[in-house]
């Protein structure tokens, strides 16, 4: 059974690629083995997406190619 990690004590880190203007802010919470929690920093109490590390690495690779 898959379980959602407890993120109540997560320490969120803003992406270095966020524009700083408050419009494109993505945060990740490191420290969860095999998982990468991601949220929109403009809505900190909103939904969190949780990716596996392999899926997240694949996403970053493709995003970097598109930049």
Image (tube, grey):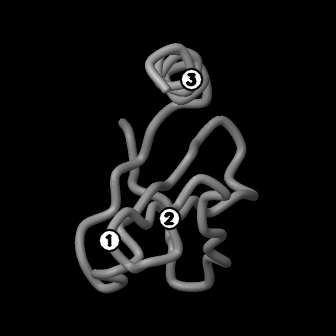
Check disc 2 and report the residue beneath it. Answer: 19
Dot 1 or dot 3, earlier in sequence: 1
Q: Residue at x 55, y 27 (%)?
A: 60
- 38 to the left or right of 54: left
- 30 to the left or right of 44: right
- Quarter of the figure that contains the N terminus: top left
Q: Secondary structure at mark 2?
A: loop
Q: Secondary structure at mark 3?
A: helix
Residue 64: image tag: 3
- 35 to the left or right of 62: right
Q: Position of residue 31 (x, y in %)?
A: 75, 58
Could you say which is closer to the camera, residue 61 or residue 35? 61
Q: Residue at x 50, y 54 (%)?
A: 37
Query: How far apart, in angstroms, are the residues tagged by discs 3 and 2?
Result: 16 Å
Discs 3/2, front: 2
Q: Residue at x 50, y 70 (%)?
A: 6
Q: Are marks 1 and 2 in contact (CB under 8 Å)?
A: yes
Q: Position of residue 33 (x, y in %)?
A: 71, 44
Other residues around mark 2 within 10 Å, as few (<14) / some (14–19) / many (≥20): few
Other residues around mark 1 within 10 Å, as few (<14) / some (14–19) / many (≥20): few
Check disc 1 and report the residue beneath it. Answer: 23
Query: How far apart, in angstroms, are the residues tagged by discs 1 and 2?
Result: 7 Å
Dot 3 or dot 2, earlier in sequence: 2
Could you say which is closer to the camera, residue 43 or residue 66? 66
């Amino acid at each position: 059974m898959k379980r959602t990690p407890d993120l109540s004590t997560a320490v969120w880190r803003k992406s270095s690629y966020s524009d700083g203007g408050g419009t494109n802010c993505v945060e990740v919470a490191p420290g969860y083995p095999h998982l990468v929690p991601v949220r929109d920093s403009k809505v900190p109490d909103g939904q969190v997406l949780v990716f596996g590390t392999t899926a997240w690495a694949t996403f970053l690779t493709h995003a970097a190619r598109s930049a």
